[in-house]
Amino acid sequence: MSEKDPQISARERLKESLSVSLDGHSNDLELRRVLDGISKDDELRSLAGRYQLIGDAIRGEVNQFAGVDITSSVMAAIEQDDIDSSFNQKLSDSSRSSVNDSDGVPKSSNLIKGLWVSLGKVAIAASVAVAIIVGVRNSNPPADVQLMAVNEPATLTQPVQLAHTGQNDYGASGIRAGYNSKLHDSITPEQLAYAQSLADRATRERFHAYALQHAELSAMGNGQSILSFARLTSFDSQ
Amino acid sequence: MKQTQWISGKLLVLVIFISSFLNADTVPDSSNLLEKMVDSSKKLSFQGEFVYQQGAQLETLSIIHQAGDNDHSEKERIIYLDGAPREVVRDGHELFFSSYNEGVTRFQHGSLMPVINKLQGGISEKYYDLKIVGIDRVAGREALLLLVLPKDRFRYGYQLWLDRESSLLLKSVMVDDQGKIIERLQFTSLNVGSLSDETKDLLIRKPPVVDETITVKSQPDRPSDPLQWETGWLPDGFLLENRSVRPSPVSQHNVDALVFSDGIASFSVFVEQDDTRVLSQASEKIGALSAVSKIYREGNQYFHVTVVGDIPLGAAERVAVSVRPLKIKP
């Protein structure tokens, strides 16, 4: 890609970047260019779908989600939503409404609903990057040694940051990679940081809630209930 | 000649004596020992205190357990002795989790959860190397030290100290594949046997107010009501232990809950309809637990998959990405 032959048309270069971006090697600028290009060009869009399939096939596992045309649907979502003007407005609206309709609904679900509503607009934009990366990574099993060796370059750009150190380090979330990509200039870093913290809180709530469910399930089953419930203590240090 | 006969005869007696000693006196083979551990934790009454450490955090907890019999259901109370007051009260099909910060959650089961795949004795041995390596003392009791080493990367390793008399778990150390200690549990005192009346009174004291009730419907494999999704990949040896439907703790929908276990480790897979319609993925290690959340799309339907369990994060992620809708069948 480094050498630019004048004969190569813009579309050819776009195709090339497309292939690179679906392989997970592209930078932000390239990704944005590809997305813009895809949205204007039907042929390129189908090409994107094909690359995605090829990528999956190379990685050895074609699954049922492989055919989903993620890019087009996400672009459509962006076109429909006016992110620039309405973000702040909607944010305050939704936080108000989530306070109001709290009757009869469990507290935690309400909180998450509120978070997600306010998050929605930013998240659509941000999820462009995530959707593409996740879509391609769909079949990338991180734990298998053999596959890991084959997929090594892809694994490096995986959107998920793992919190290795454990309990106090919340906030590793798949959405983060998308936010950091600065896909839309209209979103300020402050808004990104805010949206990110909302997403992290929602994820934390979810994990907390389901860790309790899991403890209950294993205690009722064959598990050692002392261990199952003792493990919940890690949530208290938050 | 006579002397050699005499020596070999003596040796034989000695060998018989030793082997009978091993058989009779609770040194069963290591796989049986694990089964007995699970069995004892349900069928014996006991009371004790233990410490639990994960990372830099150390907590003290106490447990009272009463075995079930014809007249009484199995009862249990676990009290967190440090930090914000919390406790778990279990009475048969009912379990309360009370937390000072979050109120009381009641789990209500229509019946005891049916175990779909009863774990077979040999299963642990297939996926772990089990070895009794010595005798030790924990909480003033004689304990057998059992090494449980995983044969693949999809589970953790354990050192288990099991009470020689009752096979109850006295101490447990869980390590990852680097040998790093992830969690440690150790009893500081344990009394096995019938409980005093005072202690029994503690067991029947339930929280007066319940903030949230979760009604769990067990679903033994019913062809008329199949799941909408399936797990495409599971680590070898993990069998479905049970399956249920319950209201989701984080959304307005119901959530399918499946528990898988290899006899030592276990994880749950939760699948519910998703309203956010934002494809995302998050994974995290929370102490000894790995948690993965992932949203899928199938046409206009979005599914949220959450995997939680005491398995390595890589294994949990692989399970989460393998979940797929079942609609399209060739």
Image (cartoon, rainbow, N blue to C red):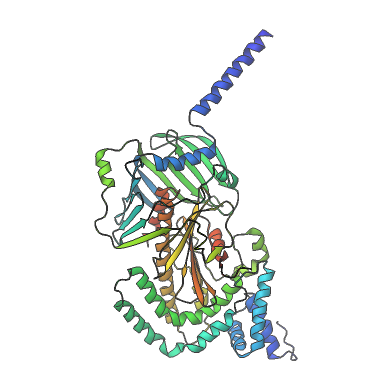
Is residue A194 shown to the viewer in this render?
Answer: no
**In the displayed structure, does residue A190 sit left or right of residue B239?**
left
Residue at position x 45%, y 84% in the image: A188
Viewer-proximal residue, B66 or A234? B66
**In the displayed structure, does residue A181 sit left or right of residue A201?**
right
Residue at position x 30%, y 38% in the image: B195
Residue at position x 63%, y 77% in the image: A22
Q: Residue furthest top?
A: B2
Residue A144, given in percent of the width and then of the height, sits at 62, 59
Is residue B323 shown to the viewer in this render?
Answer: yes
User: Where B282 falls versus A84 (above or below)?
Assistant: above
Residue B224, given in percent of the width and then of the height, sits at 50, 62
- In which quarter of the view is residue B14 placed? top right
Where, quadrant-wise, is the N terminus of chain A in this rendering?
bottom right
Residue A5, given in percent of the width and then of the height, sits at 74, 88
Viewer-proximal residue, B37 or B172? B37
- In which quarter of the view is residue A98 placed? bottom left
Q: Residue furthest front?
A: B224
User: Where A90 falls versus A148 (above or below)?
Assistant: below
Where, quadrant-wise, is the C terminus of chain A in this rendering?
bottom left
